[in-house]
Amino acid sequence: MNGEEFKLKLNERIAYAENIIKSYLPKEEGRQKLILEAMNYSVLAGGKRLRPIFMMESAKLFGDLRLLPPFMAAIEMIHTYSLVHDDLPAMDNDEFRRGRETTWKVYGEDQGILAGDGLLNFSMETALKAFDAAESPQDYIRIAKALQVLYKKAGVYGMVGGQCVDVYMEGSKDTLDMETLMFIHKNKTAALIEASMMVGAILSGADDGIVAKIEKCAYNIGIAFQIRDDILDVIGNGEELGKPIGSDAENEKQTYVDIKGIDASEKDVEKMSDEAVEILESLPGEHEFLKELILSLVNRRK
């Protein structure tokens, strides 16, 4: 697959995911209209839609996509809520994301908090709509297992747990060691990518052994993605990134690059990505696009 063909296929998938996400967003009406506007502003700020795409591509390996759409929307709502809260003054204190003002900057800090809360809760309401498409007892079992994975990976034993340690270490005088940093990256970043790919596989009928392989593949993708993010915060272009570079250093936040340096970090991104591709190639189904997507993340500039 050449570069232009991959770009075309990626744009097609982004557009498809975008339409799915929009179809599940709440209507901006009623006395709580302001919070609904803030929620939708956050979700519609754009982005790569990587998590719904990973979910869809993982499901395609096994062929059954009937139960997928509500979960595709739900994972993006969870991801977006985490960004809304990350941007808050008490967290990363960022005023710009994806090339425009962050939610709290537009709607106020109070509504920014509530917008994140609203998106998290609404993600559950949305994912539960998958039961409407269930056609058999097996479908109900798949949905229940997918819900367990999604909300564990998003919670205190996943993303929230990683955020907790990340925030604690920022305000601590303790030196950040590699073990702690990897705990943060595994949970704060990789967990939602793991959830995306595992949920896609579960909903389309993959067995537990295959799901475990997919979890490991997604872990590698998530870690490589986060290391690349740390690298870009040092050497990236702010205009391309859609947010200021150097925010980690400004916030006195230690990163993978601080511990290992740019060159070693680059090599680790490549190693983790290569391992993810190897795992992918051991799985059934067509995965050429997924492989190209992983490689594109290795070399991304934004």
Image (cartoon, rainbow, N blue to C red):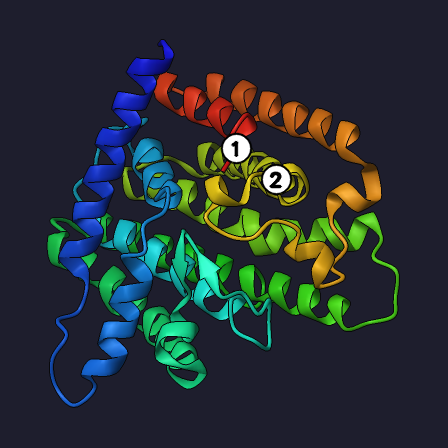
Residue placed at 37% from the left, 82% from the top?
A: 111
Q: Position of residue 233 (x, y in %)?
A: 63, 45
In the rendered image, which residue does mark 1 sit on?
301
Is the C-beta separation of discs 1 and 2 under 8 Å?
Answer: yes
Regarding residue 171, the answer to whether it shows in the image is yes
* Callout 2: SS: helix
Q: Give x and y (percent) for residue 213.
A: 52, 32
Q: Position of residue 109 (x, y in %)?
A: 45, 81
Residue 160, placed above or below residue 139: below
Image quarter where the N terminus lies is top left
Comparing 210 with 235, the one in front is 235
Please tell me in which quadrant of the rendered image residue 105 appears. Answer: bottom left
Q: Amino acid at mark 2?
A: Leu
| Residue situated in front as seen by the camera: 280 or 144 | 280
Q: Return the residue at label 2.
A: 232
Q: Which mark is residue 53?
A: none
- Residue pictured at 56% horizontal, 53% vertical: 244
